[in-house]
Amino acid sequence: MTSHDVVNRCRRIFGERRVGHAGTLDPAASGVLPVCVGPATRLDPYLTGHDKAYRATVAFGASTDTDDAQGAVVKESDVPAEAWSERFARGVLNEFVGASNQLPPAYSAIKVGGKKACDAARAGVVIDLAPRPIVVYAAELLAVREVAFQGRTLLAWDVAFEVSKGTYIRSLARDIGIAVGCASTLAGLERTRVGALGLENCVTLEALEEAGVRAALDPVDLLGFRLLFARDDAARRIGNGGALDPRGLELFCPPDRGFDEMCACTSGIAPSCKPLEDGERISVVESNKLAAIYAYDQEKGRLKADCVFRTGVIRGCYL
């Protein structure tokens, strides 16, 4: 199932055409896929670009044309005996932690000359993709084991990765094999976190069919910005996208509670006296809805509208 398939399913569930996802998930992968519905689709720019976390299975002894289990095996090789050693595995993984330039897989959604690299690859056209800067924050070995892969039994490492936006785990699996000295591929992948959103905050599509809007998360929690409550004159100005003088406005820290608490009101907050920083975004709450997102312009000393929601975004109900 592709990310677009999930979006189409959500359109049917909610009876809403305005549905989008914040971060493509490979068809063979499972895990976290943030989905925005209705006015919340305008939150997409604030939800993409976050760091991500994955559980991956890197298999050794075979490589595929797509660098994952979806592709055809194009190379097989012997696997060095030391690859069975957890100590050796941790040493190899440690070499990948930090900033580097990564060559994306040939089968990727990157566009070159207006055409997706994956479409060109399927047509037999080779496109030269430029390396891209990435950061691997952590690469923790979870297990060394055998896995079944396209009729073969292969040595595999289960690894927990924490990475920056734009990192291809398929490319990491490919490059880890090069470091080990044999063919390799990504045999399994689960995304466990996107920004602040983790697996524990998610529901399956089957559960979503039952829950509907009750599965909605609180965007104020999810964004993690400081917030203010719009009342009276400020509420009218915000509705028209007018600038705000922050003097006299009380800011609050983000709600201090987990996503799984059964509450759509703003509880667990505390006043924040920290000075505003240039470009800092603020969530504006009115009538228990996210009414707008404002950004601070230090030069003019004003909060300016970054995004105003005409009908507001519901604060969510927790399963």
Image (tube, helix red, strand yellow):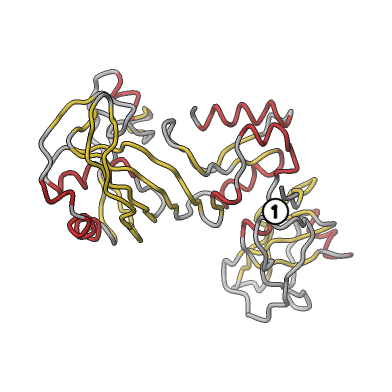
- What amino acid does circle 1 point to? Asp
Residue farthest along the right direction in this orientation: 232
List x then y, in percent, for residue 116: 37, 29
Q: Position of residue 193 (x, y in %)?
A: 49, 51
Q: Quadrant of residue 188?
A: top left
Q: Residue furthest top?
A: 123
**Where is residue 60 shown, x and y percent of the image?**
20, 39
Name the residue at 62% across, 62% down: 224
Residue at 79%, 66% in the rendered image: 229
- Residue 189 lies, with reference to residue 159, above or below; the image says above
Q: Nearer the viewer, residue 102 or 57?
A: 57
Q: Which of 297 and 85 is in front in this view?
A: 85
Q: Is mark 1 on a helix, strand or loop?
A: loop
Q: Is residue 28 left or right of residue 69?
A: right
Instruction: Classify residue 189 by image quadrant.
Output: top left
**In this figure, which residue is indicated by the disc labeled 1?**
218
Please give the name of the residue rendered at 49% of the width and 29% of the height, measured from the top-left corner.
2
Instruction: Name the residue nearer the viewer: 62 or 169.
Output: 62
